[in-house]
């Protein structure tokens, strides 16, 4: 399974959202859109009716929300490539993952740093994608705690074919290490969005993850 750089969008209002879409239009193919309810994550982002994407984008929506029933049917109606929910959400996560898959959409499961894979084993079995969250909820940044890579072995022992994502602190300095550690999808927010030349940073990250290891 080859690795991919996925630019992220995290916007508090429609104007900011458009600005971030514009910054990655023209080179982004698969994109990670964050939404938050202001409860699970402290920041309140754009609402579901304000979400849109240029034609041709493969869109993954990361739902940092507690009340899954209020969000998931509306997100399913958008027909994204994937909907990612948190294992730590207050709603019925297992039922939600099944609901997403039954709609023909990839079901993603995000794990916060403190969540141990074996404690959410049944959820991992239902997921098409498990995202290791090493960031700060509701904001760009965070640090890529490479200790979290140990979770990949544990996740794969539960669901061998699952796609592995990473969110938080991806940079040119660590992208290669993350891919070597087993990450398939590197979600990159601030490093691309805050760059003076987003395309150049995206290209550099792609070069890093496509390097072959030298023994």
Image (spheres, rainbow, N blue to C red):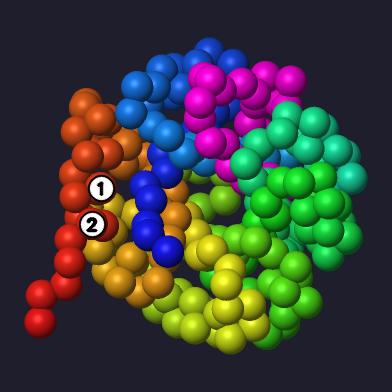
Mark 1 lies on a secondary structure that is helix
Residue 192 percent location from the top left of the image: 32, 36
> Residue 80: x and y, percent?
66, 36
Q: Residues within 10 Å of mark 2 (few under 14, many from 20)?
A: some
| Mark 1 Cα shell of 10 Å, populated few (<14), some (14-19), many (≥20) | some
The answer to whether residue 113 shows anywhere in this view is: yes
100 drawn magenta: no
Q: As drawn, is 45 to the left or to the right of 22?
A: right
Which residue was labeled with disc 2? Answer: 210
Magenta stretch, residue numbers? 44-66
**Is residue 64 visible in this depiction of the protein?**
no
Quarter of the image with the N terminus is bottom left
Q: Exactly how many numbered labels are in the figure? A: 2
**Where in the figure is residue 110, as x and y percent of width and height?**
62, 60
Residue 142, relative to residue 8: is it above or below?
below
Where does the C terminus fall, quadrant-wise? bottom left
The disc label shown at residue 206, or none: 1
User: Within the image, what quadrant is residue 95 found in?
Assistant: bottom right
Q: Residue at x 10, y 75 (%)?
A: 214
Q: Residue at 73% across / 39% down in the picture?
A: 37
Q: Is residue 26 above or below residue 61?
A: above
């Amino acid at each position: 399974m080859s690795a991919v750089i996925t630019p992220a969008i995290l916007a508090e209002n429609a104007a900011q959202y458009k600005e971030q879409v514009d910054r990655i239009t023209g080179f982004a193919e698969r994109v990670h859109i964050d939404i938050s309810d202001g409860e699970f994550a402290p920041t309140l982002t754009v609402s579901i009716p304000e979400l849109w994407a240029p034609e041709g984008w493969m869109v993954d929506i990361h739902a940092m929300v507690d009340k899954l029933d209020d969000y998931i049917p509306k997100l399913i109606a958008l027909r994204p490539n994937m909907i990612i929910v948190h294992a730590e959400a207050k709603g019925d996560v297992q039922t939600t993952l099944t609901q997403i898959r039954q709609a023909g959409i990839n079901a993603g499961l995000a794990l916060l740093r403190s969540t141990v894979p074996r404690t959410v084993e049944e959820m991992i079995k239902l997921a098409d994608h498990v995202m290791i969250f090493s960031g700060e909820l509701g904001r760009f940044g965070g640090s890529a705690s490479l200790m979290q890579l140990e979770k990949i072995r544990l996740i794969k022992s539960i669901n061998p074919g699952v796609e592995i994502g990473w969110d938080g602190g991806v940079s040119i300095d660590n992208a290669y290490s993350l891919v070597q550690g087993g990450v398939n999808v590197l979600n990159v927010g601030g490093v691309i969005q805050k760059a003076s030349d987003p395309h150049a940073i995206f290209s550099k990250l792609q070069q890093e993850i496509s390097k072959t290891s030298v023994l």
